[in-house]
Amino acid sequence: MENINESSVPARVDAEDSSTDDLQGQELLQGLEKASWHGVSLCKYKGVWCPLTVFVPTLRCEKYFKARDTDIILATLPKAGTTWLKALTFAVVNRSRYPLDKHPLLTSNPQSLIPSLEFNIYDQENENPDLDLIPDPRIFSTHTHYDSLVSTVVVESKCRVIHICRNPLDQVISLWHFMINMIGIGRFVPLDEFLETYCQGMHVYGPFWEHVLGYWNAHLKSPEKVLFLKYEDLKKDINFSMKKIAEFIGFPFSLEEEKAGLIEEIAKLCSFDKLKNLEVNKVGMHSPHIKNSYFFRKGEIGDSANYLTPHMVDRIEKVVEEKFEGSGLKF
Ligand code: PAP
């Protein structure tokens, strides 16, 4: 997740210095429900609470982005495991290009190796960038919902989508810390207040149940198109999960690679401890508001137990039970 503060919302544009997209966006925006979520401006677009800062980029993405059959799209809710999935996918796809001891992951944050469609590709400056210049396979990330992705990505191409989800208890705690930390934007929000809006579905890219169920149902319908992963499964058996990812995107590990221990080596390179302790992730900045280190907090299953009261756990679990009932999805 990137800058989502009000200060970088484009000022209302006037006809002389704005593009048609900006104007259409502003017009559309006027009819949308808006909210200030703990200081962050959101608008509800096609049922999704979208940060205002990326509203116009989201429209541009819908309008201009044409997926290639070879594209790989990493689709996640903020704090579900985006950074880890980016590192793994990048390392799997590029494994014959870079030796592990001179790997870009050693000097770059995984977030900067795989651009986000809304936050980086179609950012405020890039109205319609030439994506043809990017060689195959292009890898992009998105936080948007499956239904929003359909018009641009899924229907017209054979590109593959990887979704990772996470236990909502841990995810909300991860998001809470991240929001509080953001330089110049973050402010302390009592956890119970934060939780309440989360349970109402009002949060960046919420409601979380609609996000997750969109990808879950798409996976059930077209498993060859949408891979559905769980953060907890990756924690339990990263080698197995990595093989699954590699096969899904058409880069399966050969027997020789397996025997040579390459899967274990890549898992180690992408592990929380390894990435967290790299200089670039200790001191680097992702953006003016976000240090690279914010993407590496604890990286554990069950850290939420250190923050949530039994009442809070009950509150989230009731929502989860109600919203996911009958879906076959368990956390
Ligand atoms: P984003 O959606 O804003 O990009 P994302 O990477 O999904 O964030 O979430 C960050 C979480 O993933 C953090 O969880 P925590 O707050 O509970 O600690 C972060 O620590 C965790 N994380 C980052 N990299 C890894 C990794 N390599 N292995 C396991 N967990 C990781």
Image: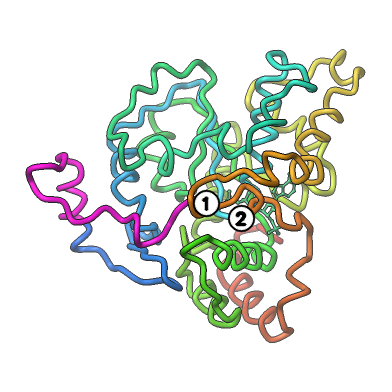
Q: Which residues are magenta?
A: 1-28
Disc 2 + disc 1, Cβ < 8 Å: yes
- Ligand 1 under 8 Å from disc 2 Cβ: yes
Q: Of the residues shown, which amino acid type is indicated by label 1?
A: Met
Front position in the image: 244 or 283: 283
The extreme left residue here reads 16
Quadrant housing residue 302: bottom right
Residue position marked by numbered label 2 in the rendering: 79
| Helix, strand or loop status at disc 1 | loop
Specify the label residue 326 is tagged with. Answer: none
Q: Position of residue 221 (x, y in %)?
A: 55, 42
Q: Residue at position x 72%, y 19% from top?
A: 95
Relative to 134, residue 227 above or below:
below
Quadrant housing residue 326: bottom right
Q: Residue at position x 34%, y 71% from top?
A: 35
The extreme bottom residue here reads 311
Residue position marked by numbered label 1 in the rendering: 1
| Helix, strand or loop status at disc 2 | loop
Relative to 305, residue 128 above or below:
above
Which label's residue is closer to the chain start, 2 or 1? 1
Q: Of the residues shown, which amino acid type is indicated by label 2?
A: Lys
